[in-house]
Image: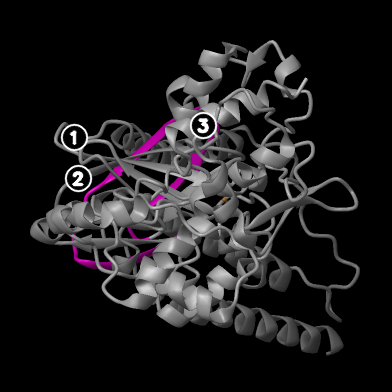
């Protein structure tokens, strides 16, 4: 009697748990990252294999669980068979052959479409649009080699054209995953993996890094926007243009973009000072629906809050001022600025893309030396046409270090705020046999290095010293060569 009660109880609980699982999966099945609502050919191939495996294993589960249930009920102990031992069987060659062959056949049935899907994913059609998805801690960079544009966080794709995504990583292992469109490919440092699919419906799709990659792994999201062919072409054209400030706030923000050291890490094509390579490209931010690796909707207030304190919104973010904590671990803290300044920066970044004529008109303004903190700009002007044999020491070079923002990444002897930890310390710099471990240390090479480090060492995090004039770079070289 008691045994029967326990049975009913257990069966009821199992039924409840299964029901809840079905209910939960049905709810999430409607979500933006559903794997069971494919919206592309490749996602459907995955879904078909998934469906097949689910039906087969479901049938096996019902068969085995049913048999088990029947055996347990049929041979349970009861008042009239307590001392009875059922008929015992040992070894049955026919049965053993049958239960070897059936699972082997089932595995073959599953293996054939699986292998077909794998080979299909490795052979994209010839007319596919090529996109590079590069994982960084903790954001996605998207490059379009054919269109020669670069963006981050939001992948634009034309409707109906196959796209082949080549993915790699700049640091640790990430994984590219857009459940409704394609899934899931590891992004490995030093290796390119490919996946391809054809988007079949316009709209926004949600992607997510699917490999644990550190503090903000769960925040490493992105969006895919599938748009018409014409809209895609317009987006490409706009992405080549810099944001064009249309009001005084945005203009002030453009200046701050240099003085608040954003240019150390960010590129804005069309803004000659912004050539940083460590952070996301910021062209066409006004057209992105989300910011902060697709964590927040793209509004001026959200963007200003993000600029002012990214670490508060996304733990561990590698944005701001670098320093080493008590344990010697590299960390970042927000750049000091007022709320008004953050709003101005947001206004600049969210300015609509300007045409070439407008960008050309703005260029002289951009190239004008930005005001540096503490009147350093005035000092610089006073010292300017030099290289007259006067001693070049830390004191005279300090304004250049401030203007060129060298301090944000390097420790520089004698320069008080130069405590950056992203790049190597420059103590004893001139005694090193090579620059960046690639070219011999000499005056000429050092100048080339400051002018265009990417040309000498592709993928270096060092940006061109674009904020410095040619003459200022020469002075900087002379100074660096004194650091023995
Ligand atoms: Cu990148 Cu997880």
Q: Are marks 2 and 1 in contact (CB under 8 Å)?
A: yes
Nearest to the observer: residue 219 or residue 80: 219
Q: Secondary structure at mark 1?
A: loop
Residue 162's label in the rendered image is 2
**Residue 400: which disc?**
none
Q: Give the Cα distance between marks 2 and 3.
A: 47 Å
Badge 3, how many Cα within 10 Å: few under 14, some, many 20+? many
Disc 3 target residue: 473
Residue 192 lies in what quarter of the image? top left
Q: Is residue 412 left or right of residue 48?
A: right
Which residue shows up at 59% across the image and 25% down it?
477
| Quadrant location, the N terminus | bottom right
Residue 24, percent from left and from top: 52, 79
Q: Residue at x 27, y 31 (%)?
A: 123
- Judge by depth and name the residue closer to the eye, 287 or 222: 287
Magenta residues span: 180-207
Q: Earlier in the sequence, mark 3 or mark 1?
A: 1
Q: Which residue is mark 1?
A: 125
> Is there any visible trace of residue 33 in the rendered image?
no
Q: Is residue 187 magenta?
A: yes
Residue 379 visible to the viewer = yes
Q: Earlier in the sequence, mark 2 or mark 3?
A: 2
**Neighbour class for label 2 at 10 Å: few (<14), some, many (≥20)?**
many
Viewer-side residue, 195 vs 456: 456
Is 473 drawn above or below residue 400 in the view shown? Answer: above
Q: Say which residue appears at 24% left-offset and 54% top-offset.
A: 241
- The answer to whether mark 3 is within 8 Å of ligand 1 is no
Q: Secondary structure at mark 2?
A: loop
Percent position of residue 294, x then y: 45, 66
Which colour assignment does the render follow? one colour
């Amino acid at each position: 009697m008691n045994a029967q009660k326990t049975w009913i109880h257990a069966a009821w609980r199992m039924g409840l748990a299964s029901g809840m699982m079905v209910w939960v999966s049905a709810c999430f099945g409607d979500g933006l990252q559903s794997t069971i609502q494919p919206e592309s050919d490749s996602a459907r191939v995955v879904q078909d294999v998934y469906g097949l495996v689910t039906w087969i294993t479901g049938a096996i589960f019902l068969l085995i669980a049913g048999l088990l249930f029947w055996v347990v009920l049929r041979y349970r102990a009861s008042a009239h068979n307590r001392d009875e031992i059922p008929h015992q069987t040992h070894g049955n060659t026919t049965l053993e052959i049958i239960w070897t062959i059936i699972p082997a056949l089932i595995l073959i049935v599953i293996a054939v479409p699986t292998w077909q899907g794998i080979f299909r994913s490795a052979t994209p059609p010839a007319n596919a649009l090529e996109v590079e998805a590069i994982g960084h801690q903790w954001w996605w960079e998207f490059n379009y080699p054919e269109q020669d544009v670069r963006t981050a966080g939001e992948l634009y794709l034309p409707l109906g054209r196959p796209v082949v995504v080549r993915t790699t990583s700049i640091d640790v292992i990430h994984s590219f995953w857009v459940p409704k469109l394609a899934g899931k490919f590891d992004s490995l440092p030093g290796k390119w993996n490919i996946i391809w699919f054809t988007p079949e419906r316009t709209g926004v799709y949600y992607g997510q890094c699917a490999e644990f990659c550190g503090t903000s792994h769960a925040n490493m999201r992105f969006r895919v926007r599938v748009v018409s062919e014409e809209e895609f072409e317009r987006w490409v054209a706009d992405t080549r243009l810099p944001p064009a400030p249309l009001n005084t706030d945005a203009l002030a923000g453009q200046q701050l973009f240099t003085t608040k050291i954003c240019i150390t890490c960010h590129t804005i094509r069309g803004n000659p000072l912004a050539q940083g390579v460590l952070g996301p490209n910021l062209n066409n931010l006004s057209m992105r629906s989300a910011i902060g690796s697709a964590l927040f909707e793209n509004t001026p207030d959200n963007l200003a809050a993000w600029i002012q304190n990214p670490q508060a919104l996304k733990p561990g973010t590698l944005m701001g001022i670098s320093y080493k904590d008590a344990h010697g671990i590299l960390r970042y803290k927000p750049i000091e600025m007022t709320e008004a300044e953050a709003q101005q920066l947001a206004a600049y970044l969210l300015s609509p893309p300007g045409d070439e004529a407008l960008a050309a008109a703005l260029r002289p303004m951009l190239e004008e030396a930005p005001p540096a903190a503490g009147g350093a700009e005035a000092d610089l002007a006073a010292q300017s046409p030099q290289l007259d044999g006067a001693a070049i020491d830390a004191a005279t070079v300090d304004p250049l270090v401030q203007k060129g923002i060298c301090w944000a990444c390097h420790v520089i002897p004698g320069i008080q705020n130069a405590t950056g930890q992203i790049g190597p310390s420059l103590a004893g710099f001139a005694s090193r046999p090579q620059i960046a471990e690639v070219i011999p240390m000499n005056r000429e090479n050092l100048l080339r290095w400051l002018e265009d480090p990417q040309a000498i060492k592709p993928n270096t995090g060092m940006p061109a010293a674009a904020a410095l004039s040619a003459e200022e770079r020469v002075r900087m070289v002379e100074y660096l060569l004194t650091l023995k």
